[in-house]
Image (cartoon, rainbow, N blue to C red):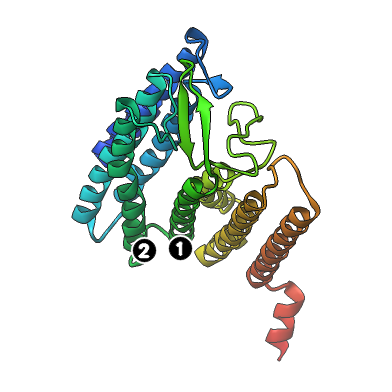
Amino acid sequence: MTILGQCLSALRRWHRPLVANAALMFTLTVVSAIGLFLDDRLLMGESVWVKPMKFGFAMGVYGLTLAWLLSKLSRGRRLGWWLGTVFAVAGLLDVGAVVYAAAHGTVSHFNNNDEPVAETVRTAFNVGVAPILLITIIIAVLVLIQRTGDRAMSRALRAGLGLAIASMVVALWLSNSAGARTVTDANGNPVSMNGGHGIGDPDGNGMFLTHWSTTGGDLRVPHFVGLHAIQVLLLVTAILGVLATRQHWLRDERVRARLVGVAGLGYTGAFATLTWQAKRGVPVTHLDRQTFIAFAGVAVFTLVAAAAVVVAARRRSTPPTDAALSGVAAG
């Protein structure tokens, strides 16, 4: 069987509604990228299609990860299937609202206008956003009560889902991080805004593509970092698995699990630091003294903890020397 055939065979075992959702999201990402060049409308300094492109990609990656994860459950598979299906529908509503607003050249999030497009978007968000957080919490509980793969993978999934939940809680802060104001949409119409993603500068932007704020704190940064922790930690798990074929001290899954745990703690520290930085109104591009100390502390802890695990594992796996064996025999 070819590699493509193996991939297609594996995909058939994944959660199909979520796979279909991911396919739609990645298609939206491509279409939105094309829209950047064909549609010259600007919304708050960026193309109206930037947000649909980012949301489509992020939801596609996360949905595909859940589709794979749900296929690994040994208990609660039927519940997992229904949860995944509801997540796929809710995600479609959530991202669909962003696309709908973009197509009409208006703001999706925090739009407080009393007109049909804004009201439709708010309704879609009210229906679609809450299930995404709730379902992620329930799936995290399902993963906690069983082993999904070896110890390293189980630890990566638990830490990753926990951070995903934390990132969604951070996103809820967005609605309370800025007051009322008025901006102009792509059609030149005023939009009454209530809430925002920026701290200090409610609608600040500046970074290429992401448009994360360079003029104030931006809670989209920790939201993004936490949401994709599960992919990063699974990548760490996969890399350790490959290295285990060459390093005998890594073949013990408890060692790999400990290293993944250290990576999870380090990632959590970075997530907490980014959240704290944003809440203080400091741009992610500005490394002030407090942020530097926090990141340095996280880095030192992670490196020391990882080194301790590696040293202990190598010491336990070192075969006895000939001299030591001779001494034992003589005794």
Q: Are marks 2 and 1 in contact (CB under 8 Å)?
A: yes
Q: Amino acid at mark 2?
A: Arg
Looking at the image, which residue sits at the far right? 289
**Image quadrant where one finds the N terminus:** top left
**Image quadrant where one finds the C terminus:** bottom right
Element marked by disc 2: loop
319 and 210: which one is in front? Answer: 210
Q: Position of residue 59 (x, y in %)?
A: 40, 37
Q: Residues within 10 Å of mark 2 (few under 14, many from 20)?
A: some
Note whether 238 is above or below 36 in the view shown.
below
Note whether 197 is above or below 306 in the view shown.
above
Query: Residue beneath label 1, please?
Result: 151
Query: Residue beneath label 2, please?
Result: 147
Q: Which of the numbered marks, if any, corresponds to residue 165?
A: none
User: Which quadrant of the figure has residue 29?
Assistant: top left
202 and 97: which one is in front? Answer: 202
Does residue 89 appear to the left or right of 111 in the view shown?
left
Does residue 252 appear to the left or right of 19 in the view shown?
right
Q: Position of residue 299 (x, y in %)?
A: 72, 57
Residue at 30% over, 42% down: 128
Does residue 161 appear to the left or right of 277 in the view shown?
left
Q: Amino acid at mark 1?
A: Arg
Q: CA distance from mark 2 to mark 1?
A: 7 Å
Q: Position of residue 33 (x, y in %)?
A: 48, 18
Residue at 46% over, 58% down: 162
Does residue 326 appear to the left or right of 181 in the view shown?
right
Residue at 61% over, 51% down: 246
Note whether 33 is above or below 169 in the view shown.
above
Q: Position of residue 124 (x, y in %)?
A: 29, 36
